[in-house]
Amino acid sequence: MEEVVNENSPSLKMEELRDLKRRALVCLSSIADSAPTPTKREKREHADRELYCSLIKTFDNKAWKHSDLCAKDLVSHGWRNNNGKTVKCDSCQKVICTDLPSISENVDVYKKCVSDINRRIVESHQLTCPRRSSSIKISKFENLIDLKADMIKRLKSNDDDLQLKIDFAMEVPTQSFSSYPRERVICSLLNWGITKQVVSPNKCRLQFACDLCNRCTSLSENESFDPVLNHMKWCPLFDKDNNGMAMWRSHLSLLTQEKTVRITSEATSMIVGKVKSLLRKSISTVALEECN
Ligand SMILES: [Zn+2]
Ligand SMILES: [Zn+2]
């Protein structure tokens, strides 16, 4: 078929190409801007973790009796437990009354109050408060060094002569923690801090505490401990990633792989820079072709 050539087509083609190039550059710039650099992302995740832990502490079993109001939901929107009856946002200073009526008096009223408070977790912030839209999340460790550092922090804080019995059949590589018994490595992986309490000269109890869900339980030394089932069901360790894998399983998998792929910010900006440079050259080539 014979090609129909419009006399305006060369300039139209150039305009189209320029437009395509402009759009490609805008797209590239947005990729470079929106992809948080690992350093920035890691800093943000670290800050979130610290903030989460400091807020969730205020909801420990003694200070927070409302099991139907999930502490993690409140904390993820920046609420700090004041006194068991109110929670406060440090960013906008707003307060929510969390005093609930007795469930035994009127279940319907109780359920309505719980549902009202859950709605206010977002709505009670001032319109400009950052906690209204962004939540404080515990993210899984993406690299092995951070995971190990977190585990070692707990392992070091334990008493050296801890003797544990645990219910955990899965294989866990312990070569990186060779100076610690397998049971303690597993408990640390599952975020348990352990303290030994001497009850009498011949009797000790072991106290297990998770600082992500505030679960705290104590056992005698010869009792067996299940490091998975003892967490609160909403513990962030069971939050699932995009592949449906619970956080603690991702950590176990990371420990097993003993390697991690790290995309650095330098690599991302280098790729974007190269593509931009190619695009710039492309218009020159087109211009050259048009001249010839
Ligand atoms: Zn607020
Ligand atoms: Zn937990």
Image (cartoon, helix red, strand yellow):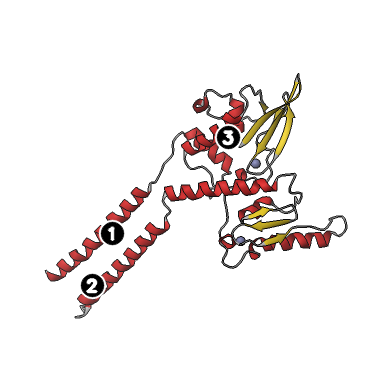
Badge 3 element: helix
Residue 208, horizontal then vertical, whole percent = 68, 34
Residue 149, horizontal then vertical, whole percent = 51, 35
- What is the crowding at mark 1: few (fewer than 14 residues within 10 Å), some, or many (at least 20)? some
* Residue 54 to residue 180: above or below: below
Rendered-image quarter of ligand 1: bottom right
State the residue in front, 120 or 20.
120
| Residue located farthest toward the top when viewing the structure as drawn | 202
Amino acid type shown at disc 1: Lys
* Residue 51 to residue 195: above or below: below
- What is the crowding at mark 3: few (fewer than 14 residues within 10 Å), some, or many (at least 20)? many
Can you tell which of label 1 and label 2 is closer to the viewer? 1
Residue 39 in the figure: left or right of residue 100: left
Amino acid type shown at disc 2: Met
Amino acid type shown at disc 3: Leu
Quarter of the image where the C terminus is located: bottom left
Quarter of the image where the N terminus is located: bottom left
Residue 39 in the figure: left or right of residue 118: left
State the residue in front, 84 or 193.
84
The residue that label 3 is drawn on is 189
Based on the displayed image, in which of its 4 quarters is residue 238 positioned?
top right
The residue that label 2 is drawn on is 14
The residue that label 1 is drawn on is 276
- Marks 1/2: CA–CA distance: 18 Å
Q: Is mark 2 within 8 Å of ligand 1?
A: no
